[in-house]
Image (tube, grey):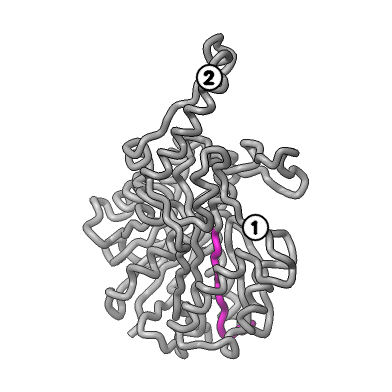
């Protein structure tokens, strides 16, 4: 008999430091003016282009983002630095990424009514790992006191949905009773805060989901995983070349291609229809009409992308609450975005209601998780 798996608890860690668009624009424009003044001669003779200032209106129109949370606000807003300054910790202290992951995981465990003794493993699924090894997941597992196994996985912004499928498959196969999928994202560390086209995109956060057999789930907000679907397709349109073979320059300033870069228009043109078609194909395979989906918890990258996907899937403009947006407050939090939306906007639905968690991003990668609210 196939084991039915459920998401029985979710958790969310939000950093205490928020940056508004107004604060971010003020810092960015100060940097731009200083740069243009320092390179006045080169700009005048045409050997260097002048940098263009940003604006709150530009950011909101381009993305729908109004603020973001970050681990370090001071360094990010310092026009002379414009990067987070997060001190390294000694090896005998918990790392920053693990610490925020543990906070989200503990909340998910509490919501599910589970302790470390009930859980057999941890998957740390995220875009931005603090180190190559030991695995962040093993550190989180150790901090939580969980026996069993743990491993890291990175599928960029789709890491959470890929992690959910991996965990669900292992529970169905009898390899674990319950698993935590943890998504700690310190996106501020890989963002080029000096690039006008992307300086506003990302924020920091951590989320977690606890999965277990549906017949033992005790949470009053448990969701059966009806089905999952994953897709990848290679593209250079979203890329980050940082790695142990190409560290930062001697002055400590990251080279542009070692930070987040994307060709936004190409991404929109190629990813949005791919994801919408994938959702329609997946629900069609399960005999589910789009009208049966009470809610879409989409990846939170850009409000225009989400609106387009929701309209294409539903065949109309979504009504309030059908495709909740959290990126206005959190910005793009990579793999955690759709999980934040699910965490915040799922408890009001009724038993038997169907919904869909969807992620998409670099790779390209995309994942869909069809869920049904349990009684």
Q: Earlier in the sequence, mark 2 or mark 1?
A: 2
Q: Nearer the viewer, residue 126 or 51?
A: 51
User: Which quadrant of the figure has residue 179?
Assistant: bottom right
Would residue 133 appear left or right of 94 to someone viewing this image? right
Would residue 238 appear left or right of 241 to someone viewing this image? left
Q: What SS does tag 1 mark?
A: loop
Q: Is residue 367 above or below residue 112?
A: above
Residue 295 shown in magenta: no
User: Which quadrant of the figure has residue 132?
Assistant: bottom right
- Identified at 34% across, 66% down, the residue is 288
User: How far apart are the two marked residues, 2 and 1, measured between alpha carbons?
Assistant: 34 Å
**Disc 2 and disc 1 in contact, CB within 8 angstroms:** no
Query: What is the count of numbered marks?
Result: 2
Q: Position of residue 369 (x, y in %)?
A: 45, 66
Q: Which mark is residue 87?
A: 1
Q: Is residue 276 visible?
A: no
Q: Nearer the viewer, residue 276 or 346?
A: 346
Q: What SS does tag 2 mark?
A: loop
- Identified at 64% across, 78% down, the residue is 143
Magenta span of residues: 174-185
Residue found at the very far right of the displayed protein: 245
Secondary structure mainly formed by the magenta segment: strand
Would residue 353 appear left or right of 6 to someone viewing this image? left
| Residue designated by label 2 | 49
Q: Which mark is residue 144?
A: none
Q: Position of residue 214 (x, y in %)?
A: 45, 84
Q: Nearer the viewer, residue 290 or 38?
A: 38
Crowding at mark 1 (Cα within 10 Å: few <14, some 14-19, many 20+): few
Q: Position of residue 216 (x, y in %)?
A: 47, 90
């Amino acid at each position: 008999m196939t084991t039915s798996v459920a998401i029985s608890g979710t958790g969310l860690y939000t950093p205490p430091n928020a940056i508004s668009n107004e604060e971010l624009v003020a810092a960015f424009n100060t940097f731009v003016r200083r740069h243009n003044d320092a390179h006045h001669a080169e700009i005048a003779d045409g050997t260097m282009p002048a940098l263009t200032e940003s604006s709150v209106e530009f950011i909101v129109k381009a993305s729908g983002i109004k603020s973001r949370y970050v681990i370090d606000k001071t360094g990010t807003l310092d026009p002379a630095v414009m990067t987070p300054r997060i001190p390294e910790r000694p090896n005998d202290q918990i790392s920053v990424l693990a610490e925020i992951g543990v906070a989200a995981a503990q909340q998910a465990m509490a919501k599910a009514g589970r302790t470390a003794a009930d859980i057999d493993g941890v998957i740390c699924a995220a875009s931005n790992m603090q180190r190559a090894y030991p695995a962040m997941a093993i550190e989180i597992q150790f901090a939580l006191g969980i026996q069993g196994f743990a491993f890291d996985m990175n599928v960029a912004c789709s890491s959470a949905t890929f992690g959910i499928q991996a965990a669900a498959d292992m529970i169905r196969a009898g390899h674990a009773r319950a698993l935590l999928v943890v998504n700690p994202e310190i996106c501020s560390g890989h963002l080029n805060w000096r690039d006008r086209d992307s300086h506003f995109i990302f924020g920091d956060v951590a989320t977690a989901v606890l999965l277990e057999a549906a017949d033992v789930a005790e949470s009053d907000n448990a969701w059966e995983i009806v089905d999952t679907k994953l897709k990848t397709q290679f593209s250079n349109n979203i890329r980050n070349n940082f790695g142990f073979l190409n560290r930062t320059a001697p002055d400590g300033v990251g080279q542009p291609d070692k930070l987040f870069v994307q060709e936004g228009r190409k991404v929109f043109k190629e990813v949005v229809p791919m994801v919408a078609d994938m959702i329609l194909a997946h629900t069609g395979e399960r005999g589910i009409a789009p009208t049966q989906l009470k809610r879409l918890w989409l990846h939170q990258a850009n409000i225009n992308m989400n609106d387009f996907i929701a309209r294409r899937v539903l065949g109309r403009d979504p009504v309030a609450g059908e495709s909740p947006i959290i990126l206005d407050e959190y910005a793009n939090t990579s793999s955690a975005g759709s999980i934040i939306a699910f965490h915040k906007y799922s408890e009001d639905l009724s038993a038997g209601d169907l919904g869909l968690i969807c992620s998409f991003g670099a790779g390209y990668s995309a994942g869909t998780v069809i869920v049904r609210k349990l009684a």
